[in-house]
Amino acid sequence: MYDPKSLKAEEFIDHEEILATLEYAEQNKSNRELIEQILEKAKPQKKGNGYVCKGLSHREASVLLVCDIPDLVEKMYKLAREIKEAFYGNRIVMFAPLYLSNYCVNKCVYCPYHYQNKTIPRKKLTQEEVAAEVMALQDMGHKRLAIEAGEDPVNNPIEYIIDCIKTIYSVKHKNGAIRRVNVNIAATTVENYRKLKEAEIGTYILFQETYHKESYEKLHPAGPKHNYAYHTEAMDRAMEGGIDDVGLGVLFGLELYKYEFAGLLMHAEHLEAVHGVGPHTISVPRIKHADDIDPDVFDNGIDDDTFAKIIACIRIAVPYTGMIVSTRENESCRDKVIGLGISQISGGSRTSVGGYAGYSADERPHDTEQFDVSDQRSLDEVVRWLMDLGYIPSFCTACYREGRTGDRFMSLCKAGQILNCCHPNALMTLKEFLEDYASPETKEIGEKLIKEELEKIPNPKVKQKATEYIENIHLGKRDFRF
Protein backbone atom coordinates (compact mmCIF):
# COMPACT_ATOMS: atom_id res chain seq x y z
CA MET A 1 0.00 0.00 0.00
CA TYR A 2 1.40 3.41 -1.02
CA ASP A 3 2.31 5.59 1.96
CA PRO A 4 4.74 8.51 1.48
CA LYS A 5 5.18 8.76 5.27
CA SER A 6 6.19 5.14 5.65
CA LEU A 7 9.84 4.32 6.34
CA LYS A 8 9.58 1.07 4.36
CA ALA A 9 10.96 1.31 0.84
CA GLU A 10 8.23 -0.78 -0.79
CA GLU A 11 5.54 1.43 0.74
CA PHE A 12 6.89 4.89 -0.15
CA ILE A 13 8.05 3.57 -3.57
CA ASP A 14 4.97 1.45 -4.21
CA HIS A 15 5.09 -0.59 -7.43
CA GLU A 16 1.33 -0.67 -7.89
CA GLU A 17 1.09 3.10 -7.38
CA ILE A 18 3.71 3.65 -10.08
CA LEU A 19 1.86 1.37 -12.50
CA ALA A 20 -1.41 3.19 -11.74
CA THR A 21 0.39 6.51 -12.26
CA LEU A 22 1.70 5.44 -15.67
CA GLU A 23 -1.77 4.26 -16.69
CA TYR A 24 -3.32 7.54 -15.52
CA ALA A 25 -0.70 9.52 -17.43
CA GLU A 26 -1.26 7.54 -20.61
CA GLN A 27 -5.02 8.03 -20.37
CA ASN A 28 -4.61 11.79 -19.96
CA LYS A 29 -1.65 12.60 -22.21
CA SER A 30 -3.97 14.32 -24.70
CA ASN A 31 -6.28 15.88 -22.09
CA ARG A 32 -5.60 19.51 -22.91
CA GLU A 33 -7.81 20.91 -20.16
CA LEU A 34 -6.12 18.84 -17.44
CA ILE A 35 -2.60 19.58 -18.73
CA GLU A 36 -3.29 23.32 -18.82
CA GLN A 37 -4.60 23.11 -15.24
CA ILE A 38 -1.43 21.30 -14.17
CA LEU A 39 0.77 23.91 -15.82
CA GLU A 40 -1.23 26.73 -14.25
CA LYS A 41 -0.89 25.15 -10.81
CA ALA A 42 2.90 24.92 -11.21
CA LYS A 43 3.50 28.56 -12.15
CA PRO A 44 5.64 30.67 -9.78
CA GLN A 45 3.52 33.11 -7.79
CA LYS A 46 4.93 36.41 -6.58
CA LYS A 47 5.13 36.67 -2.78
CA GLY A 48 6.91 39.62 -1.19
CA ASN A 49 10.37 39.87 -2.73
CA GLY A 50 10.30 36.29 -3.89
CA TYR A 51 8.19 33.57 -5.42
CA VAL A 52 6.39 30.48 -4.23
CA CYS A 53 5.62 27.37 -6.21
CA LYS A 54 3.27 24.52 -5.37
CA GLY A 55 5.20 21.97 -7.36
CA LEU A 56 3.47 18.86 -8.69
CA SER A 57 2.62 15.38 -7.50
CA HIS A 58 4.25 12.41 -9.21
CA ARG A 59 0.96 11.76 -11.03
CA GLU A 60 0.59 15.31 -12.32
CA ALA A 61 4.21 15.44 -13.46
CA SER A 62 3.88 12.05 -15.17
CA VAL A 63 1.03 13.44 -17.27
CA LEU A 64 3.29 16.27 -18.43
CA LEU A 65 6.07 13.82 -19.24
CA VAL A 66 3.97 11.86 -21.73
CA CYS A 67 2.09 14.83 -23.19
CA ASP A 68 2.90 15.11 -26.90
CA ILE A 69 0.81 18.16 -27.83
CA PRO A 70 3.44 20.49 -29.36
CA ASP A 71 2.22 23.85 -28.04
CA LEU A 72 1.77 22.44 -24.52
CA VAL A 73 5.23 20.89 -24.58
CA GLU A 74 6.59 24.30 -25.50
CA LYS A 75 4.66 25.83 -22.58
CA MET A 76 6.28 23.20 -20.36
CA TYR A 77 9.76 24.23 -21.43
CA LYS A 78 8.92 27.90 -20.98
CA LEU A 79 7.61 27.24 -17.47
CA ALA A 80 10.70 25.21 -16.54
CA ARG A 81 12.88 28.15 -17.56
CA GLU A 82 10.73 30.58 -15.55
CA ILE A 83 10.96 28.44 -12.42
CA LYS A 84 14.72 28.02 -12.74
CA GLU A 85 15.13 31.79 -13.13
CA ALA A 86 12.80 32.55 -10.20
CA PHE A 87 14.65 30.39 -7.66
CA TYR A 88 18.20 30.04 -8.97
CA GLY A 89 18.63 33.03 -11.24
CA ASN A 90 21.26 32.68 -13.96
CA ARG A 91 23.82 31.01 -11.69
CA ILE A 92 25.35 27.62 -12.48
CA VAL A 93 27.35 26.05 -9.66
CA MET A 94 30.60 24.29 -10.63
CA PHE A 95 32.07 21.11 -9.15
CA ALA A 96 34.31 18.17 -10.00
CA PRO A 97 34.29 14.50 -9.00
CA LEU A 98 37.29 13.01 -7.18
CA TYR A 99 37.58 9.23 -7.36
CA LEU A 100 39.32 7.79 -4.30
CA SER A 101 39.15 4.04 -4.93
CA ASN A 102 37.68 1.58 -7.40
CA TYR A 103 37.81 -1.42 -5.10
CA CYS A 104 34.27 -2.79 -4.85
CA VAL A 105 32.58 -5.95 -3.57
CA ASN A 106 29.35 -5.48 -5.54
CA LYS A 107 28.44 -7.08 -8.84
CA CYS A 108 26.50 -4.23 -10.46
CA VAL A 109 26.17 -5.25 -14.11
CA TYR A 110 26.30 -1.65 -15.44
CA CYS A 111 29.47 -0.55 -13.60
CA PRO A 112 33.06 -1.52 -14.52
CA TYR A 113 34.06 -1.51 -10.85
CA HIS A 114 32.12 -4.75 -10.21
CA TYR A 115 34.31 -7.28 -8.45
CA GLN A 116 34.32 -9.83 -11.31
CA ASN A 117 35.95 -7.38 -13.72
CA LYS A 118 39.53 -8.66 -14.00
CA THR A 119 40.63 -6.28 -16.77
CA ILE A 120 40.41 -3.03 -14.81
CA PRO A 121 43.39 -2.20 -12.55
CA ARG A 122 42.39 -1.73 -8.92
CA LYS A 123 43.63 1.42 -7.26
CA LYS A 124 43.16 3.23 -3.97
CA LEU A 125 44.66 6.65 -3.32
CA THR A 126 46.99 7.17 -0.39
CA GLN A 127 46.55 10.37 1.61
CA GLU A 128 49.58 11.80 -0.18
CA GLU A 129 47.95 11.01 -3.53
CA VAL A 130 44.67 12.54 -2.35
CA ALA A 131 46.55 15.74 -1.51
CA ALA A 132 48.18 15.74 -4.96
CA GLU A 133 44.79 15.31 -6.64
CA VAL A 134 43.38 18.17 -4.59
CA MET A 135 46.22 20.50 -5.58
CA ALA A 136 45.65 19.63 -9.24
CA LEU A 137 41.94 20.41 -8.86
CA GLN A 138 42.73 23.65 -7.02
CA ASP A 139 45.06 24.63 -9.85
CA MET A 140 42.07 24.34 -12.20
CA GLY A 141 40.05 26.61 -9.92
CA HIS A 142 37.69 24.17 -8.24
CA LYS A 143 36.30 24.87 -4.76
CA ARG A 144 33.70 22.08 -4.49
CA LEU A 145 34.29 18.36 -4.93
CA ALA A 146 32.13 15.25 -4.99
CA ILE A 147 34.15 12.29 -3.73
CA GLU A 148 33.44 8.82 -5.08
CA ALA A 149 34.51 5.34 -3.98
CA GLY A 150 33.45 1.76 -4.58
CA GLU A 151 31.84 -0.22 -1.77
CA ASP A 152 34.49 -2.30 -0.02
CA PRO A 153 34.50 -2.52 3.79
CA VAL A 154 38.13 -3.67 3.82
CA ASN A 155 39.69 -1.26 1.32
CA ASN A 156 37.27 1.67 1.64
CA PRO A 157 35.97 1.68 5.24
CA ILE A 158 34.29 4.80 6.58
CA GLU A 159 37.53 5.67 8.41
CA TYR A 160 39.34 5.89 5.06
CA ILE A 161 36.64 8.17 3.64
CA ILE A 162 36.83 10.42 6.72
CA ASP A 163 40.62 10.59 6.48
CA CYS A 164 40.33 11.60 2.82
CA ILE A 165 37.85 14.36 3.69
CA LYS A 166 40.24 15.69 6.36
CA THR A 167 43.09 15.66 3.85
CA ILE A 168 41.01 17.46 1.22
CA TYR A 169 40.05 20.25 3.62
CA SER A 170 43.63 20.58 4.90
CA VAL A 171 45.26 21.32 1.54
CA LYS A 172 45.85 25.04 0.93
CA HIS A 173 47.78 25.49 -2.30
CA LYS A 174 48.58 28.98 -3.58
CA ASN A 175 45.15 30.70 -3.47
CA GLY A 176 43.37 27.37 -3.72
CA ALA A 177 41.14 25.71 -1.15
CA ILE A 178 38.39 23.11 -1.37
CA ARG A 179 35.59 24.67 0.65
CA ARG A 180 33.00 21.94 0.40
CA VAL A 181 33.18 18.15 -0.04
CA ASN A 182 30.05 16.34 -1.16
CA VAL A 183 30.07 12.57 -0.71
CA ASN A 184 28.82 9.86 -3.07
CA ILE A 185 29.44 6.54 -1.34
CA ALA A 186 27.41 3.40 -0.73
CA ALA A 187 24.45 3.21 1.62
CA THR A 188 25.63 2.88 5.20
CA THR A 189 24.54 3.08 8.83
CA VAL A 190 23.15 5.97 10.87
CA GLU A 191 26.36 5.90 12.91
CA ASN A 192 28.49 6.30 9.79
CA TYR A 193 26.30 9.10 8.51
CA ARG A 194 26.89 10.87 11.82
CA LYS A 195 30.62 10.50 11.22
CA LEU A 196 30.24 12.07 7.77
CA LYS A 197 28.24 14.92 9.28
CA GLU A 198 30.96 15.50 11.89
CA ALA A 199 33.50 15.58 9.06
CA GLU A 200 31.55 18.57 7.70
CA ILE A 201 30.46 17.14 4.40
CA GLY A 202 28.11 19.11 2.18
CA THR A 203 25.52 16.94 0.43
CA TYR A 204 25.29 13.17 0.73
CA ILE A 205 24.55 11.80 -2.73
CA LEU A 206 23.31 8.31 -3.52
CA PHE A 207 21.84 7.23 -6.83
CA GLN A 208 19.05 4.69 -6.69
CA GLU A 209 20.04 3.41 -10.17
CA THR A 210 16.49 2.03 -10.58
CA TYR A 211 13.34 2.15 -8.47
CA HIS A 212 11.97 -1.02 -10.10
CA LYS A 213 12.64 -3.61 -7.36
CA GLU A 214 12.73 -6.67 -9.62
CA SER A 215 15.08 -4.97 -12.09
CA TYR A 216 17.16 -3.59 -9.21
CA GLU A 217 17.82 -7.07 -7.83
CA LYS A 218 18.77 -8.41 -11.27
CA LEU A 219 21.11 -5.48 -11.91
CA HIS A 220 22.72 -6.02 -8.48
CA PRO A 221 22.96 -9.83 -8.32
CA ALA A 222 25.55 -9.98 -5.54
CA GLY A 223 27.08 -7.81 -2.85
CA PRO A 224 25.61 -5.52 -0.18
CA LYS A 225 23.98 -3.34 -2.83
CA HIS A 226 21.69 -6.24 -3.74
CA ASN A 227 19.50 -5.28 -0.75
CA TYR A 228 16.91 -3.00 -2.37
CA ALA A 229 15.28 -1.84 0.87
CA TYR A 230 18.55 -1.03 2.64
CA HIS A 231 19.70 1.02 -0.34
CA THR A 232 16.39 2.81 -0.93
CA GLU A 233 16.00 3.72 2.75
CA ALA A 234 19.53 5.16 2.98
CA MET A 235 18.42 8.79 2.79
CA ASP A 236 16.22 8.35 5.86
CA ARG A 237 19.21 7.00 7.80
CA ALA A 238 21.38 9.86 6.50
CA MET A 239 18.87 12.44 7.68
CA GLU A 240 18.52 10.63 11.01
CA GLY A 241 22.31 10.93 11.26
CA GLY A 242 22.08 14.71 10.93
CA ILE A 243 22.74 15.17 7.21
CA ASP A 244 20.01 17.51 6.03
CA ASP A 245 21.19 17.93 2.43
CA VAL A 246 20.79 14.74 0.39
CA GLY A 247 20.94 14.17 -3.35
CA LEU A 248 18.83 11.69 -5.33
CA GLY A 249 19.27 10.28 -8.82
CA VAL A 250 18.57 7.34 -11.10
CA LEU A 251 20.70 5.95 -13.91
CA PHE A 252 18.51 6.46 -16.95
CA GLY A 253 18.74 3.62 -19.42
CA LEU A 254 18.51 0.71 -16.98
CA GLU A 255 14.70 0.63 -16.73
CA LEU A 256 11.78 2.37 -18.49
CA TYR A 257 12.25 6.09 -17.97
CA LYS A 258 8.58 6.78 -17.16
CA TYR A 259 8.76 4.31 -14.26
CA GLU A 260 12.01 5.86 -12.96
CA PHE A 261 10.62 9.38 -13.25
CA ALA A 262 7.59 8.53 -11.11
CA GLY A 263 9.73 6.67 -8.56
CA LEU A 264 12.18 9.55 -8.29
CA LEU A 265 9.42 12.06 -7.56
CA MET A 266 7.80 9.69 -5.06
CA HIS A 267 11.13 9.50 -3.22
CA ALA A 268 11.26 13.32 -3.12
CA GLU A 269 7.67 13.40 -1.80
CA HIS A 270 8.61 10.86 0.86
CA LEU A 271 11.53 12.95 2.14
CA GLU A 272 9.29 16.02 2.28
CA ALA A 273 6.54 14.11 4.10
CA VAL A 274 8.83 12.51 6.68
CA HIS A 275 11.61 15.05 7.19
CA GLY A 276 9.96 18.30 6.18
CA VAL A 277 12.44 18.96 3.38
CA GLY A 278 12.91 17.30 0.02
CA PRO A 279 16.17 16.43 -1.74
CA HIS A 280 18.78 19.19 -2.02
CA THR A 281 19.69 17.95 -5.50
CA ILE A 282 18.48 15.56 -8.16
CA SER A 283 20.94 14.14 -10.71
CA VAL A 284 19.99 12.73 -14.10
CA PRO A 285 22.88 10.55 -15.35
CA ARG A 286 22.48 8.32 -18.39
CA ILE A 287 24.34 5.04 -18.75
CA LYS A 288 27.59 5.41 -20.73
CA HIS A 289 30.28 3.17 -22.18
CA ALA A 290 32.99 2.00 -19.80
CA ASP A 291 35.53 -0.80 -19.41
CA ASP A 292 33.65 -4.10 -20.09
CA ILE A 293 30.32 -2.21 -20.10
CA ASP A 294 28.38 -1.80 -23.35
CA PRO A 295 25.45 0.61 -22.88
CA ASP A 296 23.72 -0.87 -25.94
CA VAL A 297 23.10 -4.04 -23.90
CA PHE A 298 20.58 -2.03 -21.90
CA ASP A 299 17.56 -1.45 -24.13
CA ASN A 300 15.94 1.39 -22.20
CA GLY A 301 18.16 4.21 -23.42
CA ILE A 302 16.64 7.64 -24.02
CA ASP A 303 17.36 10.17 -26.73
CA ASP A 304 18.33 13.80 -26.11
CA ASP A 305 14.81 15.13 -26.67
CA THR A 306 13.34 12.77 -24.08
CA PHE A 307 16.21 13.61 -21.73
CA ALA A 308 15.43 17.33 -22.05
CA LYS A 309 11.75 16.70 -21.36
CA ILE A 310 12.57 14.71 -18.22
CA ILE A 311 14.70 17.58 -16.92
CA ALA A 312 12.01 20.16 -17.62
CA CYS A 313 9.33 18.08 -15.89
CA ILE A 314 11.50 17.48 -12.82
CA ARG A 315 12.17 21.21 -12.57
CA ILE A 316 8.43 21.95 -12.70
CA ALA A 317 7.57 19.21 -10.18
CA VAL A 318 10.25 20.06 -7.56
CA PRO A 319 10.93 23.78 -8.09
CA TYR A 320 13.26 24.34 -5.12
CA THR A 321 15.54 21.37 -5.72
CA GLY A 322 18.93 21.81 -7.39
CA MET A 323 19.48 19.78 -10.57
CA ILE A 324 22.80 18.36 -11.75
CA VAL A 325 24.00 17.30 -15.18
CA SER A 326 27.54 15.95 -15.41
CA THR A 327 30.21 15.49 -18.07
CA ARG A 328 28.56 12.18 -18.94
CA GLU A 329 26.69 14.40 -21.40
CA ASN A 330 28.41 16.01 -24.36
CA GLU A 331 28.59 19.73 -25.04
CA SER A 332 25.61 19.89 -27.39
CA CYS A 333 23.36 17.99 -24.96
CA ARG A 334 24.40 20.15 -22.01
CA ASP A 335 23.76 23.21 -24.15
CA LYS A 336 20.25 21.89 -24.90
CA VAL A 337 19.22 21.14 -21.31
CA ILE A 338 21.00 23.70 -19.17
CA GLY A 339 18.26 26.30 -19.51
CA LEU A 340 15.50 23.86 -18.58
CA GLY A 341 16.30 23.71 -14.89
CA ILE A 342 19.93 22.71 -14.36
CA SER A 343 21.65 24.52 -11.48
CA GLN A 344 24.92 22.55 -11.13
CA ILE A 345 27.36 21.07 -13.63
CA SER A 346 30.78 19.48 -13.47
CA GLY A 347 33.71 20.76 -15.50
CA GLY A 348 37.15 19.44 -16.38
CA SER A 349 36.11 16.10 -14.86
CA ARG A 350 38.09 12.87 -14.69
CA THR A 351 36.41 9.62 -13.63
CA SER A 352 39.66 7.74 -13.04
CA VAL A 353 41.22 7.03 -9.66
CA GLY A 354 44.15 9.45 -9.63
CA GLY A 355 43.05 11.11 -12.87
CA TYR A 356 44.15 14.69 -12.18
CA ALA A 357 47.66 14.94 -10.70
CA GLY A 358 50.49 14.63 -13.19
CA TYR A 359 48.32 14.97 -16.27
CA SER A 360 47.94 17.96 -18.56
CA ALA A 361 44.55 19.34 -19.54
CA ASP A 362 44.71 17.28 -22.74
CA GLU A 363 45.82 14.01 -21.12
CA ARG A 364 43.25 11.60 -19.75
CA PRO A 365 44.04 8.26 -18.12
CA HIS A 366 41.44 5.67 -19.09
CA ASP A 367 42.55 2.53 -17.25
CA THR A 368 40.44 3.09 -14.10
CA GLU A 369 37.60 5.20 -15.53
CA GLN A 370 34.10 4.51 -14.22
CA PHE A 371 32.61 5.80 -17.47
CA ASP A 372 33.61 7.72 -20.57
CA VAL A 373 33.56 11.49 -20.16
CA SER A 374 31.66 13.00 -23.09
CA ASP A 375 32.37 16.69 -22.40
CA GLN A 376 36.16 16.82 -22.26
CA ARG A 377 36.60 20.59 -22.21
CA SER A 378 38.78 22.18 -19.56
CA LEU A 379 37.19 24.03 -16.66
CA ASP A 380 38.28 27.33 -18.20
CA GLU A 381 36.52 26.42 -21.45
CA VAL A 382 33.34 25.39 -19.62
CA VAL A 383 33.35 28.63 -17.60
CA ARG A 384 33.75 30.68 -20.78
CA TRP A 385 30.98 28.70 -22.53
CA LEU A 386 28.59 29.36 -19.65
CA MET A 387 29.33 33.09 -19.66
CA ASP A 388 28.83 33.23 -23.43
CA LEU A 389 25.36 31.76 -22.79
CA GLY A 390 24.61 34.46 -20.20
CA TYR A 391 25.14 32.36 -17.06
CA ILE A 392 27.26 33.12 -13.99
CA PRO A 393 29.61 30.21 -13.23
CA SER A 394 29.56 30.02 -9.44
CA PHE A 395 32.11 28.42 -7.13
CA CYS A 396 30.12 29.45 -4.08
CA THR A 397 29.92 27.28 -0.95
CA ALA A 398 28.62 29.98 1.40
CA CYS A 399 25.32 28.36 2.35
CA TYR A 400 27.01 25.21 3.65
CA ARG A 401 29.56 27.20 5.61
CA GLU A 402 26.97 29.59 7.05
CA GLY A 403 24.67 26.75 8.10
CA ARG A 404 22.06 27.50 5.46
CA THR A 405 21.27 23.87 4.68
CA GLY A 406 18.16 21.73 4.60
CA ASP A 407 14.99 23.70 5.33
CA ARG A 408 17.05 26.86 6.02
CA PHE A 409 18.31 26.86 2.44
CA MET A 410 14.81 26.20 1.12
CA SER A 411 13.48 29.14 3.16
CA LEU A 412 16.13 31.41 1.65
CA CYS A 413 15.25 30.17 -1.81
CA LYS A 414 11.53 30.71 -1.30
CA ALA A 415 12.01 34.17 0.27
CA GLY A 416 13.54 35.56 -2.91
CA GLN A 417 16.95 36.27 -1.41
CA ILE A 418 18.81 34.83 -4.39
CA LEU A 419 19.70 38.25 -5.82
CA ASN A 420 20.84 39.58 -2.42
CA CYS A 421 22.77 36.51 -1.31
CA CYS A 422 23.57 33.77 -3.82
CA HIS A 423 23.97 36.17 -6.73
CA PRO A 424 26.72 38.35 -5.15
CA ASN A 425 28.40 35.22 -3.72
CA ALA A 426 28.52 33.79 -7.24
CA LEU A 427 30.06 36.98 -8.59
CA MET A 428 32.73 37.05 -5.88
CA THR A 429 33.75 33.43 -6.43
CA LEU A 430 33.79 33.99 -10.19
CA LYS A 431 36.09 36.97 -9.58
CA GLU A 432 38.44 34.70 -7.62
CA PHE A 433 38.51 32.26 -10.56
CA LEU A 434 39.21 35.06 -13.03
CA GLU A 435 42.06 36.45 -10.92
CA ASP A 436 43.74 33.15 -10.14
CA TYR A 437 43.04 30.65 -12.92
CA ALA A 438 41.34 32.05 -16.02
CA SER A 439 42.84 32.47 -19.46
CA PRO A 440 43.04 36.08 -20.72
CA GLU A 441 40.04 35.57 -23.02
CA THR A 442 37.91 34.11 -20.22
CA LYS A 443 38.98 36.85 -17.83
CA GLU A 444 37.97 39.59 -20.25
CA ILE A 445 34.51 38.10 -20.75
CA GLY A 446 34.11 37.51 -17.01
CA GLU A 447 35.06 41.02 -15.93
CA LYS A 448 32.44 42.46 -18.24
CA LEU A 449 29.83 40.01 -16.95
CA ILE A 450 30.55 40.85 -13.30
CA LYS A 451 30.19 44.56 -13.96
CA GLU A 452 26.81 44.02 -15.62
CA GLU A 453 25.54 41.59 -12.98
CA LEU A 454 26.47 43.82 -10.02
CA GLU A 455 23.85 46.29 -11.27
CA LYS A 456 21.13 43.65 -10.85
CA ILE A 457 21.56 43.41 -7.07
CA PRO A 458 18.40 45.10 -5.71
CA ASN A 459 19.61 45.96 -2.20
CA PRO A 460 21.88 49.06 -2.38
CA LYS A 461 23.87 48.07 0.74
CA VAL A 462 24.47 44.56 -0.59
CA LYS A 463 25.49 45.97 -3.97
CA GLN A 464 27.97 48.37 -2.33
CA LYS A 465 29.44 45.64 -0.12
CA ALA A 466 29.73 43.19 -3.01
CA THR A 467 31.50 45.84 -5.09
CA GLU A 468 33.97 46.45 -2.23
CA TYR A 469 34.60 42.73 -1.80
CA ILE A 470 35.26 42.31 -5.53
CA GLU A 471 37.75 45.17 -5.42
CA ASN A 472 39.47 43.50 -2.46
CA ILE A 473 39.66 40.21 -4.36
CA HIS A 474 41.45 42.06 -7.15
CA LEU A 475 43.91 43.31 -4.50
CA GLY A 476 44.68 39.73 -3.40
CA LYS A 477 42.21 39.01 -0.60
CA ARG A 478 40.00 35.91 -0.77
CA ASP A 479 36.93 34.16 0.57
CA PHE A 480 34.29 36.84 1.11
CA ARG A 481 30.69 35.77 1.45
CA PHE A 482 27.21 36.92 2.38
Image (cartoon, helix red, strand yellow):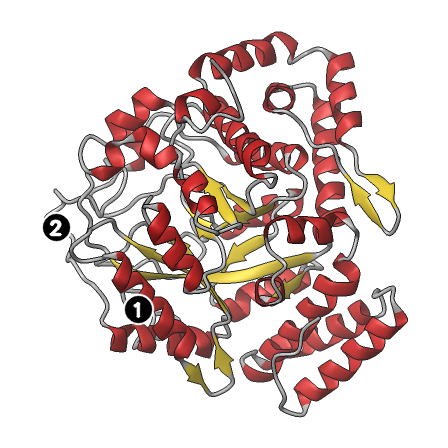
Quarter of the figure that contains the C terminus: bottom right
Categorize mark 2 by other alpha carbons within 10 Å: few (<14), some (14-19), many (20+). Answer: few
* Res 372 visible: no
Residue located 68% across and 78% down the image? 444
Percent position of residue 467, x then y: 79, 79
Residue located 77% across and 76% down the image? 466
Q: Is residue 303 left or right of residue 423?
A: left
Which of the 4 image quadrants contains residue 296?
top left
Q: Is residue 116 left or right of residue 54?
A: left
Q: Which mark, residue 435?
A: none
Which of the two labelled residues, at mark 2 and mark 1, occupies the earlier sequence position? 2
Mark 2 or 1: the one toward you: 1
Q: Which mark, residue 163?
A: 1
The relative height of residue 39 versus residue 46 in the rendered view (above or below) is: above
Check contact, mark 2 vs mark 1: CB within 8 A: no
Q: Is residue 132 left or right of residue 56?
A: left
- Residues under labels 2 and 1: Cα distance? 29 Å
Residue located 80% across and 26% down the image? 40
Q: Tell me the amino acid under the disc marked 1.
A: Asp
Percent position of residue 368, x then y: 23, 57
Q: Residue furthest left?
A: 118
In front: 34, or 166? 166
Percent position of residue 134, x then y: 38, 74
Q: Which mark, residue 119?
A: 2
Q: Tell me the amino acid under the disc marked 2.
A: Thr
Q: Residue furthest bottom?
A: 475
The relative height of residue 365 versus residue 236 in the rendered view (above or below) is: below
Which of the 4 image quadrants contains residue 298?
top left
